[in-house]
Amino acid sequence: MEKVLFCWSGGKDSAISLYEIQKSQKYEILALLTTITSDYDRVSMHGVPRTLVERQAHSLGLPLEKISISKDCSNEEYESKMREILIRFKQAGVSSVVFGDIFLKGVRKYREDNLSQLGMKGIFPIWGRDTAEVTRSFIELGFQAIVTCVNSKVLGEGFLGRVLDKHFLSELPPDVDPAGENGEFHSFVFDGPIFKKRIGYTLGEQVLRDSFYFRDLLPEGVDK
């Protein structure tokens, strides 16, 4: 089996990509790789607390490798930290990194160009699939996710903090991608066929930051 590193955001595209990778039985996943904004101790862009992503990894039975960046992190800083980790995993026998991208060609090229400099390659399990089909499949497979972030320029705050289900999809404006591939919304997956147990959470406060609405999630057992 080929050893791989899995780029993990904790959201729906990561989850269904991991499902596909595990179903293929072709790969050994050495770790999940997550970027944490150190100023907030949260997953970058998704706004999910580090503790909840650690609980995801525990439920998945996989190690979690964290990249810590500042909120004002430059591309140079990010790429330098990423390179350090990739080199370490390459020395452990990893030749490929798995991503949950679907159709953004510029993002894929950026990833592949950076990997090629280290003699590594990218794997994109759900690349090119219809985004509505991907999201419907995610729901039909029994995954459950909550929307943690929405772009206020394209979606109202009423979409925030909702479970991603068929009703949610039916209410999306026609110009919003069903998978949020353009950054319209982000999610946190708390249950599904790849998890050993559900990740418990409670809803926290809602904030607006840089035109994005975020809904805080607290691990079960933590006071608001």
Image (cartoon, rainbow, N blue to C red):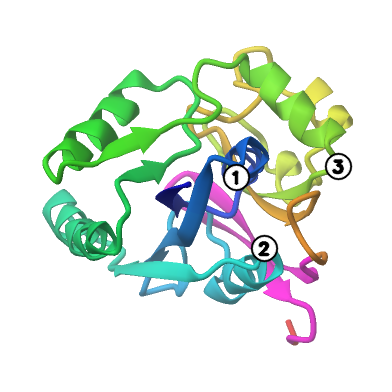
The stretch of residues the image draws in magenta is: 199-222
Which residue position holds label 1? 18
Q: Is residue 85 left or right of residue 145?
A: left
- In 3D space, how far apart are the residues under numbered discs 2 and 3 (Cα atoms)? 15 Å
Which residue position holds label 3? 142
Q: Is residue 183 above or below residue 211?
A: above
Q: Earlier in the sequence, mark 2 or mark 1?
A: 1
The reply to whether dot 2 and dot 1 touch (C-beta < 8 Å) is: yes
The x and y percentages for residue 54 are 58, 73
Circle 3 residues within 10 Å: few <14, some 14–19, many ≥20:
few
Q: Secondary structure at mark 2?
A: helix
**Who's the residue at 14% across and 59% down the image?**
80
Circle 1 residues within 10 Å: few <14, some 14–19, many ≥20:
many
Circle 2 residues within 10 Å: few <14, some 14–19, many ≥20:
some
Which residue position holds label 2? 60
Asked whether 174 or 188 is in front, the reply is 188
In the rendered image, residue 220 lying in the magenta stretch gets the answer: yes
Q: Is residue 91 left or right of residue 145?
A: left
- In 3D space, how far apart are the residues under numbered discs 1 and 3 (Cα atoms)? 14 Å
Asked whether 53 or 122 is in front, the reply is 122
Q: Is residue 14 above or below residue 56?
A: above
**Position of the C terminus by quadrant:** bottom right
Q: Is residue 23 left or right of residue 1?
A: right
Name the amino acid, label 1. Leu
